[in-house]
Amino acid sequence: IDRQVGAIAETGATHVAIAVPYDEEFVPFLERWVKSARTHNLKVWFRGNWSGWEGWFGYPALTRDEHIKKTGSFILAHPDLFQDGDAFSSCPECENGGPGDPRQTGDVAGHRKFLIAEYQTMQKDFEQINKDVRANFFSMNGDVARLIMNKETTKALGGIVTIDHYVKNPEQLVKDVESIAKQSGGKIILGEFGAPIPDIHGKMTETNQANWINRTLYLLNQTDDIEGVNYWLSVGGSTEIWTSDGQPREAVAVLTRHFKPTIVYGFVRDELGRPIVKASVTHADTRTTTDENGYYTLRFALPLAAPSISVRSDGYEEEAPKISGNLQEINVTLKKTQKDFLFHLLIRIKKWRDS
């Protein structure tokens, strides 16, 4: 446990996703995982469920009402498991158990009502134990999300849609993310993504896998619809990025570059100190624009593709300030290409006031 969690922490991940059932017989094991996460300064994304929901380990089936009551009791009974900043999923891929998949049962309204009622219960219970835990990460199949997560439901669940989504190529993954975000009106969390799934991706070498992940994370970084990502999984399946004896595959270095990005930020102004709106700030093929205050933030994966950023705006000379650290404030002053008499006068007044 500690070896796996420590390796995950080294990638720069903020959370470790732990899928231990919530039934009392499993709690001591869950506590071991959580203790290791805290040791390595990681938050926890609890992704377990009640064994009876999907019929694990011979547990009796649960109704929706029973699931809600057991979840509330679990939170109140184990306050020490949680820390501010954790996430808690009470029913990952909920369509796989209970009354069944709404795509087959047709009970779309009932499924929506259940998710909302469970979320409201968890909110209340986390408030009662005074813990700031995100409880709206109801991961689901992408097709289920298209069926269930209309704008009203998404709003009731805090504006988040969580999908466990596996597709053949990164471009399709991003297209699906943007489509579901537009339909639902919410931000998307990739509760699971990874490669290779043999039936979808076929066979992949280590390099193929690393390139697939790199391309996916690069494209996801270009969209504003993503709230977070969770690579599935660390070890023990076809998408693993560590071997069973703990050796990292090439994909670990790729994830680390994206999870520990270079971040530059600052203001872009003209010579009079006025903000320049919609100035272009780029590094290689990563781009952003300044806001109404002239502020920008640019994130890109290491290693550096170039030793500087480029700052441009129509009517101004381009600047290319150097990058010297992984977290750096770079404020830029752009000079006008053409300056009329009034601008020269204002410059002189500014220099006089600054002197």
Image: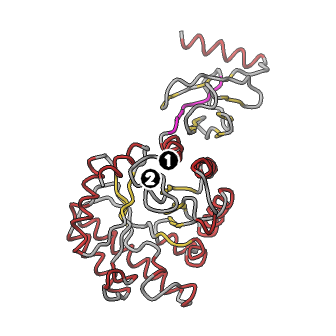
Nearer to the camera, 350 or 285: 285
Tags 1 and 2 in contact by the CB under 8 Å rule? yes
Residue 201, numbered circle: none
Q: Name the residue under label 1.
A: 249
Q: Residue at x 79, y 19 (%)?
A: 340
Q: Please identify the residue farthest to the front as the structure is shown.
A: 245
Q: Measured from the top left, where is residue 55 in percent x and y? A: 37, 84
The amino acid beneath tag 2 is: Thr
Left or right: 125 as drawn, with respect to 322: left
Residue at which label 2 appears: 243
In this rendering, would 252 be left or right of 47? right
Where does the N terminus fall, quadrant-wise?
A: bottom left
Q: Provide residue 294's location: percent of width, then percent of height.
A: 60, 34
Magenta span: 261-270
Question: Eyeballing the image, is 201 above or below 213?
Answer: below
Residue 66 screen position, x and y as percent: 32, 85
